[in-house]
Image: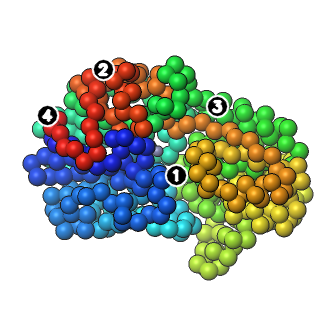
């Protein structure tokens, strides 16, 4: 097999790898760079056949539904098959109508089942479900002509599905010629340190909720399902209901997993902000609203019981909460990647918090494995070569792992 990292050899986000054997090509991940201001074609890697006209391009395998791994699918022919987890595919479809910009919703291709192999041309693919901050995330084993590549995707060992990491360490794929390994944590965390676990996050949330006299506003991605579980658990422990909007309700249902919080659970309520009510009316989403309205509440109820409520905050709630006088004693908990805040994505929100004298806390943990856990997985798989991807520090791999081979973006090499 020949392999080329089109993007990702020296950066986090926008990953894209192309693999070629006997004139048959596969693309693995097709991400929008994290620093892209808009999702436009200028970020497309130079790969032949993205218009669907070249049969040598067999398809695109997406590791998980994070924009920096699938976002550029918007710009390619819908005829190109796209492999991904079935729940991930449903989540993208459920989220699409609510989100601005070009949100791709791949409709056909391979639906992964963990550890179930399938063939694409002369390739055999085996997805492995992994623990990550995106739901339905996979590592991918790609085999052809006796050669075996393991693509880690994004993963961690400290989330609510940490057991998946332990299972992989205990029972790793063997005889791996090349491990393409993400290294997001390098440069962010000391080599001997661990990130807080999702259970630690739950404890920190319990503490923050306990000292909050009013509404607890927790700002996270509705697609970070592990985090929503932590927020719900912490809310229950502090006598609060979790309030969600229609977008979140739709995404939670799309997981297809009845163990994941749902809009009709007794400790969950639906509150539809004004901006979303306009969207619902405009797009006639009345059936969707009705479907999730079993526990619907209105602004008056939120105002009456702020200390008994946690709001899964999105910036579109600002108007309603301010108008409805719901903010006395409120705290704001930022619970996602600090980079968005630092980049200035939430500068308007910052002003709003100051205007309403709402204190801000940060409670978050990474979606990525610590250096310690990266070492464990490399030792377990024991690959012939380790190639850095999805990292700002490829040169650090040499210090951490044996048999490292660094490749630049756009460079082809033989496996
Ligand atoms: Zn990710």
Q: Using the image, tell me which numbered label, if any, was put on residue 146.
A: 4
Say which label, 2 or 3, has the lower sequence index: 3
**Quadrant in the picture for the C terminus:** top left
Say which label, 4 or 1, has the lower sequence index: 4
In this view, the residue farthest toward the left is 22
Check whether the beta carbons of the residues at disc 4 and disc 2 lie within 8 A of each other: no
Give the camera-side residue of 180 and 130.
180
Say which label, 4 or 3, has the lower sequence index: 4
Q: Secondary structure at mark 1?
A: loop
* Separation (CA) of disc 4 from disc 2: 23 Å
Circle 1 residue? 255
Say which label, 4 or 2, has the lower sequence index: 4
The residue that appears at 53% across and 48% down in the rendered structure is: 257
* Separation (CA) of disc 1 from disc 3: 21 Å
Circle 2 residue? 402
* Separation (CA) of disc 2 from disc 1: 38 Å
Q: Secondary structure at mark 4?
A: loop
- Can you give x and y, in whole percent of width and height, for residue 350 in the image? 73, 54
Say which label, 2 or 1, has the lower sequence index: 1
Give the camera-side residue of 353 and 366.
353
* Separation (CA) of disc 4 from disc 3: 41 Å
Residue 202 visible at all: yes
Check whether the beta carbons of the residues at disc 2 and disc 1 lie within 8 A of each other: no
The residue that appears at 85% across and 52% down in the rendered structure is: 357
Q: Secondary structure at mark 2?
A: loop
């Amino acid at each position: 097999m020949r392999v080329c990292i089109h993007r990702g050899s020296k950066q986090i986000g926008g990953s894209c790898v192309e693999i070629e054997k006997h004139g048959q090509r596969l693309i693995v991940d097709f991400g929008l760079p994290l620093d892209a201001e808009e999702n436009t074609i200028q970020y497309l890697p130079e790969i032949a056949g993205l218009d669907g006209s070249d049969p040598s391009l067999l398809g695109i395998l997406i590791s998980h539904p994070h924009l920096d791994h699938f976002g550029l699918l918007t710009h390619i022919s819908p005829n190109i098959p796209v492999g991904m987890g079935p729940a991930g595919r449903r989540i993208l479809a459920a989220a699409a109508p609510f989100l601005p910009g070009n949100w791709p919703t791949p409709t056909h291709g391979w639906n992964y089942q963990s550890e179930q192999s399938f063939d694409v041309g002369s390739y055999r693919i085996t997805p492995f479900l992994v623990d990550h901050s995106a739901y339905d995330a996979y590592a991918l084993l790609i085999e052809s002509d006796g050669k075996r590549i393991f693509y880690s995707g994004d993963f961690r060992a400290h989330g609510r599905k940490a057991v998946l990491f332990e299972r992989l360490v205990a029972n790793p794929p063997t005889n791996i010629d090349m491990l393409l390994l993400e290294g997001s944590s390098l440069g962010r965390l000391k080599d001997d340190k661990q990130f807080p676990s999702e259970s630690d996050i739950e404890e920190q949330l319990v503490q923050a909720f306990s000292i909050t006299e009013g509404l607890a506003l927790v700002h996270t991605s509705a697609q970070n399902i592990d985090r929503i579980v932590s927020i719900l658990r912490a809310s229950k422990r502090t006598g609060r209901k979790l309030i969600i909007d229609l977008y979140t309700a739709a995404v939670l249902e799309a997981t297809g997993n009845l163990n994941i919080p749902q809009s009709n659970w007794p400790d969950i309520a639906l509150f539809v902000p004004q901006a979303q009510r306009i969207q619902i009316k405009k797009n006639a989403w009345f059936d969707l609203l009705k479907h999730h309205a079993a526990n619907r509440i209105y602004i008056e109820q939120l105002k009456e019981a702020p200390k008994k409520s946690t709001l899964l905050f999105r910036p579109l709630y600002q108007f309603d909460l301010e108008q409805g006088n719901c903010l006395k004693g409120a705290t704001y908990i930022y619970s996602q990647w600090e980079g968005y805040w630092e980049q200035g994505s939430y500068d308007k929100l910052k002003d709003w918090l100051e205007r309403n004298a709402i204190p801000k806390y940060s409670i978050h943990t990474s979606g990525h494995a610590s250096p310690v856990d990266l070492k464990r997985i490399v030792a377990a798989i024991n690959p012939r070569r380790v190639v850095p991807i999805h990292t700002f520090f490829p040169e650090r791999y040499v210090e951490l792992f044996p048999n490292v081979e660094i490749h630049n973006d756009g460079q082809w090499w033989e496996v």
